[in-house]
Every structure is written in C-alpha cells, then in structure tokens.
C-alpha cells in the first residue's frame, strides 16, 4: 500500500519544522509583551458555530468546511478559523471574569477545503490574536502595529498594510442598497454573484470572476456615518503618529461576514500568489450575536506557512542556530551503565553549563566503530568515549568530529 498525506496537507520536518517553531516562539514573545494570554480551543466545534459567525453566504461556509457527523449524529466541523472558537470559549467560561485583560492569542491548525496551491492549503497553521472589550480605534491601531511587529520580529520586510472600514449596522445598509442599485438589472453577473446579490451584496466585491466589470462601483468610505468616519480618521492619525505606513484599500471587504468598521490585511510582494500574510479586523457584534455580553472586539490571524514562504524567499532562517549534538559512546561494554548515567546527567545539566546541546545516550549493541559512524551520520560535533584505561585514571576521551582530533579530560571537568 502506498499511503500519502491527504491532498492539501503537508508533513513539516527538518528546516521547516525548525522555522515554524522559531516563528511561534518569536510570536509568543511579542504577544506576551503586548499583554496577550494563550487560549487553546478544540480543533472541531459544532458546525453551526461557524455558519452563524462566519456567515452562510461566504466561501468558507458554502464550500470549504470539513463537516462530519459523530456517532451520536452531532454535526461537527474542523475549525476553518480561530475567532469563532475563541468567542465561544469566552462566552461559555465567562472568560471576561477570569482573564480581564481581554487579550488572547492562539496557535494551531485550521482546515479549509480549498484548491491547493503555493501558500494555500487544506490544513494550515495560524497564529491569531483577539482583543475583546475595547471599542476605541486605538485598539485597532494596536492590533495592526502588533501584526506588523510580528513580521518584523523575524526580519520580514517588504510588507504593506492595507486598511478599510466596513461601517456599522447604521451606515452599512445605505452602502448595501447602493450596491444593489449599482449591480441592478444591467450587470451580467456570474451565478454566485446573482445568488449573493440579494442576501449579501458585499460578497460580490470579493468575486474573482466578475470584479473586472465593477467600474465606478460605490465606495463604502462614502457611506460611513459620522462615528465610523471619525474612528477611521483616528485610526489613521494613530498609525501615522508611530510612523506605521499603510494604504487605504477601498475594495477591501474580507471573506468573513462578522466584520464591522476597521478591516486590514498585510501583504508581501515576495508572496507570488498575492495572498495575505495577516488579515483581520473589528467585529463588535459577534460576541453579542453568539449569546455573550455586548463586547466590542478586534483581531487578526497570521498564516504561518505563508510567512515561512516569504521568510525563505528573503533567506531569513538559513542560519538559525542549530543545537550542538554530542554522542556518548563506550569502548568497553562493562562501562555501559556508568556511561548511560553520565549521559542522563549531561542531558539534565548540560556540558560545562551549556544547556543548548542535544545528548545521545550510548548503545551497548554497537561496537565503537559503528557508534562513531552514527555520530558522523547525525553530524555530532563531539563524541565522549568511555574507555577502560582512561576511565581507571578518572578520564574520558573526547573526539572532535570536525577535525578528528582526540583528547582526554577528567570526568569532573564535564559539568
Ligand atoms: P483569514 O483571512 O481567513 O482570516 O485568514 C487569516 C490568515 O490565514 C490569512 O491571511 C492567511 O495568511 C492564512 N490562511 C487563510 N487561508 C489559508 C490557506 N488555505 N492556506 C494557508 N494559509 C491560509 C481569519 O481566519 C480570521 N479569523 C482573522 C481574524 C481574527 N479576524 C479577526 N480576528
């Protein structure tokens, strides 16, 4: 039988595994600096949670969810994103009482049945951050700056920030009506657009087939109410105040329905597909709509694989410090258990205080030649050998695998 990883999924190993761990490590450092606390939610949820939050007329819900029934006939879905799960957990556990900062982050796999291509997978990793309870545009600015800092902390440059406002429940209906009027009977639209026109005309702005026809289309920014306009202006002032450059993308609507007011994306010219590296926005109604207290919120998610593609293109992680490997070997079988204890002690305490090492325990099934061959294979920097004559003098042999030079040292000197 010839099994392969399912289409659109990947085994991540060697340098890629190191890079993704490094990215997550750096992200945690920055997120903690901004006051975010980690939350882990299940990989699957009640399918209806995503339908209600992401929106029934979105691509994700219409065609990309992995839905299945469990043995009791419950309809579940592999999470296509993390925001809905976090909101569900926030309401279910009254997290607003337990974690009053309102700042949460999550790291994990998401699942979408998309057509696989470079940077677009069916299982992918996101690092997401959500800020609950702050309706000020300063929270939007903070999230945009945080998102940008996540990328610069690992050295990614050449990124551009795009922002837009989608208005609120007061002003958006006017824009919606303007769109319906614009698309009206005259435009020749694809089936999807025709279907969505009545229910959710904003989705038409996202259409890959028809968008070239949309000339002089109404712009949401011309329909914002005073409050939404003020917030959008303040956001820009705050970003400019910290020299965070951005572009206004008047067509930016995002593929999820829960957004209100600010939406944003960070893209990189080094990502061939022109897909986003990070995307997010404000969603002031979602928590209330899912049964929680009226709580404004803003957040984003970073796609780890896309960030790694850009990092590779910019040759960023090529010199990630590799851990030094040390093999403990035996020249004489009777020294095996002593050598094993020595290896465990070194695993726990490091070598002369250096803990950034990997220690490989001795094998009593291999002769010394084979143990040295193994050291070569795993690219060990040194082999510490327990040999009878030297051991009687309280010493061990140390073979430097880079230059082949062998020396002796007293056992006590290793710790
Ligand atoms: P999203 O735009 O659907 O937003 O995804 C966020 C990021 O996940 C994208 O910018 C991209 O880097 C990555 N991503 C999405 N789909 C794929 C895929 N098929 N393969 C690889 N990477 C992908 C959300 O998920 C929202 N929950 C973001 C958010 C959080 N909004 C508010 N809070």
Image (cartoon, rainbow, N blue to C red):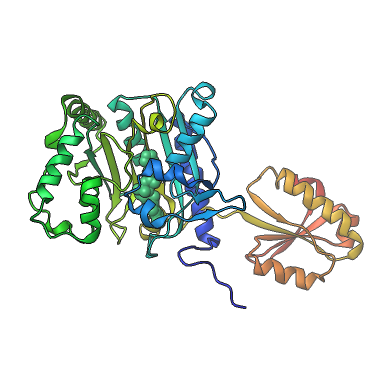
Task: Please state the horizontal and vertical placement of residue 66, each as a whole percent of the image.
Answer: 47, 56
The answer, for residue 150, to whether it is visible in the render is no
Q: How many marks?
A: 0
Instruction: Give the camera-side residue of 169 and 357.
Output: 169
Q: Nearer the viewer, residue 55 or 151?
A: 55
Q: Quadrant of the C terminus?
A: top right
Residue 65 position within the rendered picture, expressed as x and y whole percent measured from the top left: 43, 54
At horizontal 81% and vertical 64% (from top left) the residue drawn is 363
* Quadrant housing residue 220: top left
In the rendered structure, the answer to whether residue 275 lies left or right of residue 229 reads: right
**Residue 374 located left or right of residue 162:** right
Compared to residue 98, the image places residue 125 above or below, namely below
Q: Nearer the viewer, residue 293 or 390?
A: 293
Q: Quadrant of residue 314?
A: bottom left
Residue 211 coordinates in the image, percent (x, y) = 17, 56
Check the picture and name the quadrant holding the N terminus.
bottom right
Q: Would residue 212 be seen by someone viewing this image from the given angle?
A: yes
State whether residue 152 is above or below residue 339. above
- Measured along the vertical axis of the image, is residue 167 above or below residue 10? above
Image coordinates for residue 156, horizontal then vertical, percent: 36, 49
Given residues 362 and 32, the one toward you in this image is: 32
Residue at x 49%, y 52% (from the top left corner): 20
Q: Residue at x 38, y 60 (%)?
A: 119
Residue lying at the far front of the rendered structure: 73
Horizontal relation, residue 47 to residue 243: left or right: right
Q: Quadrant of residue 315?
A: bottom left
């Amino acid at each position: 039988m010839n099994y392969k990883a399912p289409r659109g999924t990947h085994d991540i190993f060697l340098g890629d595994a190191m890079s993704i761990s490094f990215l997550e490590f750096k992200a945690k450092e920055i997120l903690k600096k901004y006051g975010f606390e980690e939350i882990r939610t299940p990989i699957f949820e009640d399918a209806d949670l995503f339908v209600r939050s992401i929106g029934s007329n979105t691509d994700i819900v219409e065609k990309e969810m992995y839905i299945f029934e469990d043995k009791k006939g419950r309809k579940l879905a592999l999470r296509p994103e993390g925001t809905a799960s976090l909101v569900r957990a926030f309401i279910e556990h009254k997290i607003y009482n337990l974690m009053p900062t309102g700042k949460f982050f999550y790291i994990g796999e998401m699942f979408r049945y998309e057509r696989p291509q470079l940077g677009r997978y069916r299982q992918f990793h996101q690092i997401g951050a959500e800020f609950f309870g702050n309706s000020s545009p300063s929270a939007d600015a903070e999230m945009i700056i945080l998102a940008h800092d996540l990328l610069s902390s690992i050295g990614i440059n050449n990124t551009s920030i795009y922002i837009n406002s989608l208005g609120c429940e007061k002003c958006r209906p006017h824009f919606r009506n303007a769109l319906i009027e614009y698309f009206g009977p005259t435009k020749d639209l694809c089936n999807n657009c025709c279907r969505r026109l009545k229910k959710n005309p904003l989705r038409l702005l996202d259409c890959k087939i028809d968008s070239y026809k949309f000339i002089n289309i109404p712009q949401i920014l011309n329909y914002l109410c005073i409050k939404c306009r003020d917030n959008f202006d303040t956001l820009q002032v705050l970003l400019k105040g910290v020299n965070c450059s951005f572009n206004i993308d008047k067509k930016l609507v995002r593929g999820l329905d829960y957004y209100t007011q600010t939406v944003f994306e960070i893209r990189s010219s080094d990502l061939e597909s022109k897909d986003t590296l990070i995307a997010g926005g404000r969603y002031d109604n979602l928590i209330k709509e899912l049964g929680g207290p009226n709580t404004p919120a803003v957040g984003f998610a970073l796609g780890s694989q896309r960030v790694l593609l850009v990092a590779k293109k910019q040759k960023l992680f090529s010199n990630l410090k590799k851990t030094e490997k040390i093999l403990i070997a035996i020249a004489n079988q009777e020294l095996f258990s002593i050598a094993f204890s020595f290896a465990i002690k070194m695993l726990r305490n490091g070598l002369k205080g250096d803990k950034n090492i990997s220690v490989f325990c001795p094998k009593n099934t291999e002769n010394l030649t084979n143990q040295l061959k193994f050291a070569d294979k795993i690219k060990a920097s040194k082999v510490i050998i327990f040999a009878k004559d030297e051991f009687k003098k309280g010493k061990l042999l140390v073979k430097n695998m880079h230059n082949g030079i062998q020396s002796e040292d007293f056992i006590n000197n290793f710790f």
